[in-house]
Amino acid sequence: MGGGSGAQPRLPGPFLAGVGKGRLGRTRRIAVLERYDGTAWREVARFGDIGEANGALDEAIGDGAPPDTMRVLETHVAANRFLLIAGAIAVALAIAIVLYVVLG
């Protein structure tokens, strides 16, 4: 079907290899303890690592919290808020320029 040579595709460069893997910006991993209140999951506390969060989860369940209403999530948080703010300003500026050009 395809006219390819059967060779392996070239690997992306080091910059593109990190796309979608959280390697393009400075991020740090945190763990979040959440409780389900019947309608949505609500954040209870944030921890620097998964071990501390699991300890807090064990303590909460030991204190009588139903196990099916508690969970620990591991997530990434941007370490440099300046880049987030600069990115938001850049997006807003780009939208303003497009609207200016389109609407005249």
Image (cartoon, rainbow, N blue to C red):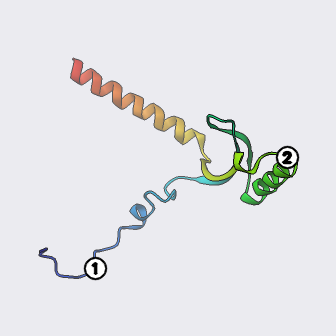
Task: Provide the secondary structure element on which disc 1 rests.
Answer: loop
Q: What amino acid is labelled 1 in the image?
A: Gln
How far across and down, in percent of the image, does residue 79 sit? 62, 48
Left or right position of 44 against 38? right
Circle 2 Cα neighbour tier, 10 Å, few/some/many (<14 / 14–19 / ≥20): few
Give the residue displayed 53% in from the left and 42% down from the top. Answer: 83
Question: What residue would you read off at disc 1?
Answer: 8
* Towards the viewer: 48 or 98: 48
Is 26 placed above or below 92 here?
Answer: below
Mark 1 in CB contact with mark 2 (< 8 angstroms): no
Q: Position of residue 51 (x, y in %)?
A: 76, 60
Q: Nearer the viewer, mark 1 or mark 2?
A: 2
Residue 91: image x %, image y %?
40, 34
Q: Is residue 34 above or below residue 54?
A: above
Report which residue position mark 2 lands on: 64
> Based on the displayed image, in which of its 4 quarters is residue 3 positioned?
bottom left
Q: Nearer the viewer, residue 88 or 44?
A: 44
**Sequence order check, earlier mark of 1 and 2:** 1
What percent of the width, then of the height, locates residue 57? 78, 52
- Can you tell which mark lies on residue 92? none
Q: Quadrant of residue 4?
A: bottom left
Residue lying at the far top of the rendered structure: 104
Kindly state the secondary structure of the residue where label 2 is placed. loop
Which quadrant, please, contains the N terminus? bottom left
The disc labelled 2 sits on which kind of residue? Gly
Answer few, some or many: residues within 10 Å of disc 1's Cα (few below 14, many 20 plus, some between 14 and 19).
few
Left or right for 17, reference 45: left
